[in-house]
């Protein structure tokens, strides 16, 4: 147990360092593009290929994303492949990692094109109220992604199929009924091809919602333990956490876009751009959004930890074997090499779940009541 905790702390420390390095390097890249004239050169390059503003911006984003991917693919390979293998958490082959990395990049590029083109349409046609329109568009995009993620996006990366264990399936569906959650199907996600980590999740909105169990969970845990972690996911559904997160995030998005609106126009003038919809100003817009996102991150993570605690307590209240919940979160923490007691600043900035030490503390208290 002590050896596992030591490994978990080492693993977490490296992951934290990689996160910080990537943030700093991303900020450095955006600043260099702004002040070296690289962004202006790229704008002039794509302007020579088309006279249409939106096609120019599309070409700019494609080149920008390609350069970013090539610059950071080495760091991503280390963090997502070499480090995972070093700590015996990955089953991926090099080719498998590369295929998934390219697939993620293409999907990210598609979403970037939709979001950025929409934002710049608002910047061009409604320079004084674009932040309100951007918030509405962000909410619409979030709802659409919530609808399609479990049906289209997750299957792009992992095979999903109805849970094959009929006895376990019936047990979980009975739990759904007891918890007041309507469900007809439980899905198993084939995680074991890529990872040795175990996980479960609620994905999607409305009728498209799916409750997902990783096969690494269903193959290595008792039915009581799976029922316990499943009850946690049902807690998210029963207490409408997905909708609460959506509402909370929309408020954050509104405040963020308004802050960008307050800073962006002044900064564009200082940097010598012609207008706020100038394509060459995209790195500046990205930098402001990145800084504001980091400022709000502790608030968002704090709210997420609050909801996770609610789901934990819900699970304990709706399962017969109370100790199975303590057992399953301990095993999950050990299997996934989660740091049981991170520093306070790491928890505040980076953790959207309570650390395992705190989860064990309040779940044992609830179990004994």
Image (cartoon, grey):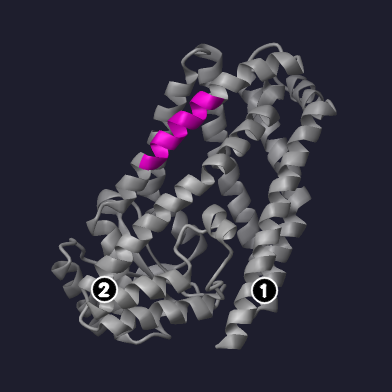
Quadrant for residue 36, please give it: top right
Question: Image point 45% across, 82% down: which residue?
Answer: 331
Q: CA distance from mark 1 to mark 2?
A: 31 Å
> Which image quadrant: the N terminus?
bottom right
Nearer to us in this view, 119 or 346: 346
> Which image quadrant: the C terminus?
bottom left
Position of residue 31 measured from the top left corner of the image (x, y, whole percent):
77, 33
Asked if residue 251 is among those painted magenta in the image, a careful observer would answer yes
User: Is residue 116 rendered to the left or right of residue 136?
Assistant: right
Residue indicated by mark 1: 10
Badge 2, how many Cα within 10 Å: few under 14, some, many 20+? many
Question: Image point 58% across, 80% down: which residue?
Answer: 5
Position of residue 32 measured from the top left corner of the image (x, y, whole percent):
81, 34
Residue indicated by mark 2: 316
- Secondary structure under tag 2 reads helix
Q: Which mark is residue 69?
A: none
Please report the bounds of the magenta region as a residue range: 248-259
Q: Is residue 128 above or below residue 337?
A: above
């Amino acid at each position: 147990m002590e050896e596992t905790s030591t490994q978990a702390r080492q693993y977490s420390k490296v992951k934290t360092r990689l996160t910080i390095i990537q943030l700093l390097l991303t900020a450095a890249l955006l600043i260099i593009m702004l002040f070296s004239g690289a962004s202006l050169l790229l704008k002039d390059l794509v302007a020579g290929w088309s006279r249409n503003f939106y096609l120019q911006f599309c070409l700019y984003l494609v080149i920008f994303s390609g350069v970013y991917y090539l610059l950071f693919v080495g760091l991503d390979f280390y963090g997502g492949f070499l480090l995972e293998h070093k700590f015996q958490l990955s089953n991926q082959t090099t080719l498998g990692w590369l295929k998934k990395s390219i697939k993620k990049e293409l999907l990210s590029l598609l979403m970037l094109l939709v979001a950025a083109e929409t934002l710049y349409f608002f910047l061009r046609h409604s320079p004084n109220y674009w932040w309100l329109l951007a918030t509405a568009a962000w909410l619409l995009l979030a709802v659409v992604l919530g609808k399609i993620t479990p049906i289209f996006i997750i299957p792009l990366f992992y095979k999903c199929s109805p849970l094959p264990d009929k006895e376990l399936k019936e047990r979980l569906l009975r739990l759904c009924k007891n918890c007041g959650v309507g469900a007809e199907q439980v899905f198993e996600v084939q995680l074991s091809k890529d990872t040795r980590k175990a996980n479960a999740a609620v994905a999607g909105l409305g009728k498209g919602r799916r409750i997902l169990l990783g096969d690494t969970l269903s193959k290595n845990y008792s039915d009581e333990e799976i029922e316990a972690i499943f009850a946690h996911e049902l807690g998210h559904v029963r207490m409408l956490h997905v909708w609460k997160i959506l509402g909370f995030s929309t408020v954050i998005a509104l405040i963020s876009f308004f802050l960008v609106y307050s800073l962006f126009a002044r900064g564009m003038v200082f940097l010598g751009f012609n207008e706020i919809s100038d394509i060459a100003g995209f790195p500046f817009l990205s930098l402001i959004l990145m800084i504001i996102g980091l400022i709000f991150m502790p608030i968002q993570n704090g709210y997420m930890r609050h909801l996770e605690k609610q789901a934990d307590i819900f699970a304990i209240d709706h399962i017969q074997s109370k100790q199975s919940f303590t057992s399953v979160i301990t095993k999950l923490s050990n299997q996934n090499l989660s740091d049981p007691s991170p520093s306070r600043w790491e928890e505040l900035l980076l953790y959207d779940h309570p650390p395992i030490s705190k989860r064990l503390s309040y779940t044992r208290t609830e179990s004994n009541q």
